[in-house]
Image: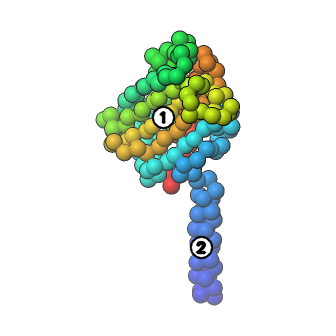
Amino acid sequence: MFKNKIGLLVVLLLALAIGNEIYKQINKVPKSAKTARLDCHKKTITFEKVLKPKLIKELHQVLASEDYKLEIFAEKAKHMETKMFNYVDVDVVEKDIIEKFNNHKLKSKIAKNGSLIIDVLIYENDKKDPGKKTKRSKLYAGYLEFTFKLNKKVVYKIQSDFMKMKGEDIPDRISCIIDSVMSLEEI
């Protein structure tokens, strides 16, 4: 009878371990791909890549401690007259990013002394770029690209298109990006 209980316990533990691995694989973020992992990813084209999955938990802690540095870059169109940056103010975008991170649900008291740098690229789609040959590549107004670097190591990178030339949908894309990074699980 004792051997039967041990055997049953081993089978249950094995089934639990296999079930847990299957769950992880189903919910795993692709290494690099167009994604629709969250509902907000379905609104526009979004790409994400997890480069250091073991650092996701630490990334969340640093974000929650509000101990990060934003470095924002704007890339204007080169082959056409810039239009978007007549409407989109980089300082306003920066304030929106900070506000949305600060309002996120995850809170922590752990600080890492500025070990996180978030590079943000605001890119204007250059529709007259000779390299853009398809109609689809000319549909979006631009994209936001966030690169999360923890102790100089790129942990996560996400790019999300916005569609409106005046940038009215940029706050929505920022929220989506923040939801994306905060929904990552340590793999």
Q: Mark 2 falls on what kind of element?
A: helix
**Quarter-wise, where is residue 67 in the image?**
top left
Tell me what residue is drawn at x 38 percent, y 32 percent. 68
Q: Position of residue 97 (x, y in %)?
A: 49, 25
Exactly how many numbered labels are in the figure? 2
Q: Earlier in the sequence, mark 2 or mark 1?
A: 2
Residue pointed to by mark 1: 146
Picture quadrant where residue 4 is located: bottom right
Determine which residue is flagged by label 2.
14
Cα separation between marks 2 and 1 = 40 Å
What residue occupies the far left of the structure in this picture?
113
Decide which of 134, 179 is in the foreground and name it. 134
Q: Quadrant of residue 173?
A: top right
Q: Which amino acid, by three-letter code, is at mark 2?
A: Leu
Q: Residues within 10 Å of mark 1 (few under 14, many from 20)?
A: many
Where does residue 185 sit, x and y in percent of width and height?
53, 49
**Residue 88 appears in view:** no
Q: Residue at x 45, y 30 (%)?
A: 120
Using a 10 Å C-alpha cutoff, classify the residue at mark 2 as few (fewer than 14 neighbours), some (14 to 19) or many (20 or more).
few
Image side of residue 126 versus residue 56, left or right: right
The quarter of the image holding the N terminus is: bottom right
**Looking at the rendered structure, which numbered label has been put on residue 161?**
none
- Point 33% across, 42% down: residue: 151
Q: Can residue 27 be seen?
A: yes
Instruction: In the rendered view, tell whether residue 6 sits above or below residue 67.
Output: below
Does 123 sit above or below residue 28? above
Q: Nearer the viewer, residue 116 or 20?
A: 116
Look at label 1 and name its amino acid: Phe
Q: Position of residue 15 (x, y in %)?
A: 63, 71
Tell me the residue at 59%/87% (across/down).
Answer: 3
